[in-house]
Image (cartoon, rainbow, N blue to C red):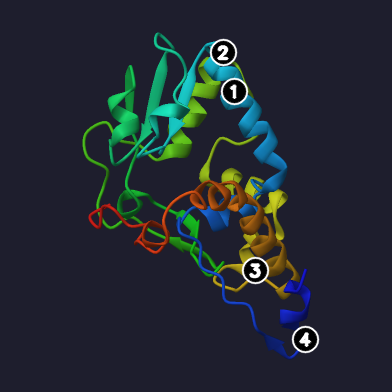
Amino acid sequence: SSLPRLLQPDWNGLAWLPLWASRTGALELGWGSAYQALEADSLQAAKSQAPDLLLLLGADNLPADRLPPPGTPIIYLGTHGDAGALQANLLLPGAAYTEKDDASWVNMEGRWQASVAAVPPPGEARSDWLIIRAMAEVAEVDLGYSDQAGVWRRLAECSPLFDPANLGRLPQAPDLLSLAQAELQCSAEQTASSQSKSAASRLASPIVDYYL
């Protein structure tokens, strides 16, 4: 691969921008190529044998071919309430990013950032981690945390990027390289499938809904 030659101690020649805002943080937490086979196997198994329960965590614009067989109980946890919510049997309203207190995210350039709530969540909406924590308690599963500080500690255990000392900092060059390589591998299947399309369709904008 020519990627290592792009990253030198005195020069960074790699410019990488994912199409999905959440992809960078997911890759930093380990959701890279190692999980592709697992995801593919899980999807294939879900099509042949219905799972006991499917949890859609902010899974908007969900393709129909990724849904399990009819009759599978589906829970949607999110804010947009798009195609994924239309397929769900139970909707759990998550707070939007402007409504989450002590929220954190990884932006597209790899910076870990934090924010405070601008407005309170409406109605019964809650931060995602609170809903997941309550579900785990019902299922008698110990997640290892019970407050926001515990969530941040768990993130730091998964990746040094989430150490409070690194808040707002860019990842180091080796980390950026690994993220880019994982992104390329994650996109390989999509690239292969797009080769059968016309050049005009490959050059079309991937943004289909500017309001989301």
Q: What quarter of the picture does the N terminus occupy?
A: bottom right
The span from disc 4 to disc 1 (Cα, nearest Å) is: 44 Å
Mark nearer the viewer, 2 or 3: 2
Task: Evaluate whether residue 143 shows in this view.
Answer: no
* Residue of label 3: 165
Report the disc number at residue 188. none
Q: Name the residue under label 2.
A: 48
The mark that comes first in sequence, 3 or 1, is 1
Helix, strand or loop under label 1: helix
Amino acid on which the number 4 mark rests in the picture: Pro
Name the residue that disc number 1 marks. 44
**Of helix, strand and loop, which one carries label 3?**
helix
Of tags 4 and 1, the one toward the viewer is 1
Q: What residue type is labelled 2?
A: Ser
Q: How far apart are marks 3 and 1 (CA)?
A: 41 Å
Horizontal and vertical percent for residue 118?
Answer: 28, 58
**Are discs 1 and 2 less than 8 Å apart at CB?**
yes
Q: Residues within 10 Å of mark 2 (few under 14, many from 20)?
A: few
- Left or right: 126 in relation to 130: left
Q: Mark 4 points at which residue?
A: 9
